[in-house]
Amino acid sequence: MVAVNNYDVVIIGAGAAGLAAGRKLHDAGKKILIVEARDRIGGRVHTTYDFADTPIELGAEFIHGENAATHDLVKQAGLHTIPVDRYGKLRWAQYSRPALPVNELPAELRATITGLFMHYRDLPKHAPQPDVSLGQYLRERGWNEEALKIADVLLAQTCCASLEALSCADLIREMRVDHAGKQEFRIKEGYGELLKWYSRDLPIQLNTSVRDVIWGEKGITVVTTREDYYARQCIVTVPVSILSRGSIRFNPPLSDDKQEAIAAFRTEPATKLIYRFHEKFWDDDLTFMCHTGLASRWWTPAYGHEGDNTAVIACFATAEKAQILDEQEENRALTWGLTELNWLLGTGERDLRKAAIDSRRVSWGFDAYARGGYAHLPPGESPAREVLARPEEGLLFFAGEATAYDTNPQTVHGALESGWRAAKECGV
Ligand SMILES: Cc1cc2nc3c(=O)[nH]c(=O)nc-3n(C[C@H](O)[C@H](O)[C@H](O)COP(=O)(O)OP(=O)(O)OC[C@H]3O[C@@H](n4cnc5c(N)ncnc54)[C@H](O)[C@@H]3O)c2cc1C
């Protein structure tokens, strides 16, 4: 194929990181092209507007933190946020009993939940040397296996990992650079509207998958399923799970350090089970309820929409729990979710299967361009994050949530900030 276009910078991927890099470079007058394999922008941000009256997030849902960079964009776009106090209003269920607010739980269980959060927050004070898993750290602080099952739901599931696979050193690194804050929000109009606004007038080539990146002093050729593109610089923002599968070939190969860093990351499945009912079986104050079951964490996507009566509830499972839900036929997984929902809501004899108008499983582990939820680092591998972010020879640059070593990885705002960082490294 003959290269048809020359660019200052070609950006691979139109997720939050790619759009952030593209926005900065384009606004600074650079000739750029964003190349995206999907038929839509957003990547792991994907809002659907046809499941319910309110926007429903199939991917990223919350803005994590009152200071997250996302808020500035929300304001500029003229959009709105809805505060959601998930952890302050947490309800927990024991075995197959209904979920109760933490302060109504038996004293011992309440002490376990608050103690686990406290030990998690205290991680930087204890900084295990050498690095150990979060599971090991908690065990060393005296928590038994029952408590660790609770920690798995409340601490590790959020990170799309198992307790035994999460590096304490990497969690501590994040706590030290965290500037986002603890409050959480949803975007009223949906994350999709934000990225639509943010990507306005950017040159984006959809339905175009990158196969090879041939790079050297004379320039870069980005070989795609559509055309070849020439550039002086290239920003790679695809998930690290895509890089580790070798879906994009680099010629010459990336440096040994970079390849080792890529290989160090793990990306586990992440699965949402989303249900819409005729009526709400829960009170308006419900934001978050959890238990140690398979469908372990539930929330109410339409929470706080003024005057809204949308009866939608969603379960978000990750790692092994998501894998088990993914291995089942979709209807079976959705039915299992309803069984556990019945316990949690205490809806007893009511047949939730009959009451559900619509339901959907969203399995990011099956997604060809994500191959899982978001990446984490196992014990001993914490330095890989910064190495993943490092440019190669001033020609190739790297952004995306996994590269967010100086902010919060695994988040949209971390991905945005990584894109801005990469644009700066390109000279803007
Ligand atoms: C289910 C789920 C829930 C989440 N919840 C939250 C949340 O509540 N809050 C939060 O802040 N974050 C959340 N996240 C994480 C957040 O979605 C990500 O951190 C962020 O969106 C990642 O952005 P990115 O640009 O790094 O990657 P992506 O969004 O994955 O963008 C990379 C892009 O590269 C494209 N691509 C891949 N391969 C190729 C190729 N060969 N050629 C061209 N293009 C390619 C992909 O299609 C994709 O569009 C969640 C993620 C998931 C999956």
Image (cartoon, rainbow, N blue to C red):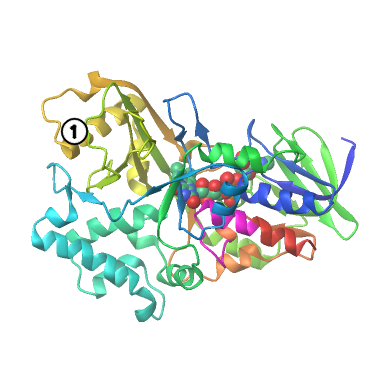
Q: Nearer the viewer, residue 92 or 326?
A: 92
Q: Position of residue 191 (x, y in %)?
A: 53, 41
Q: In what element is the residue under mark 1?
A: helix
Question: Which stretch appears magenta?
Answer: 404-418
Residue at (78, 61) in percent of width and height? 426
Q: Nearer the viewer, residue 422 or 67?
A: 67
Number of residues whose C-alpha sits closer than 10 Å to that of mark 1, classed few (under 14), some (14–19) or many (20 or more): many
Q: Position of residue 279 (x, y in %)?
A: 26, 24
Q: Amino acid at mark 1?
A: Asn
Say left or right for 411 vs 321: right
Image quadrant in which the C terminus is located: bottom right
The residue at which mark 1 appears reads as 342
Image quadrant in which the N terminus is located: top right
The reply to whether residue 373 is visible in this rendering is: no
Say left or right for 428 vs 342: right
Q: Position of residue 171 (x, y in %)?
A: 43, 67
Residue at (35, 80) in percent of width and height? 126
Q: Position of residue 211 (x, y in %)?
A: 72, 42
Q: Nearer the viewer, residue 311 or 323?
A: 311
Q: Looking at the picture, does residue 89 appear above or below residue 427?
A: above
Q: Looking at the picture, does residue 172 appear above or below residue 234?
A: below
The reply to whether residue 168 is visible in this rendering is: yes
Q: Looking at the picture, does residue 328 appear above or below residue 148?
A: above
Would you identify the image quadrant in which residue 416 lies? bottom right
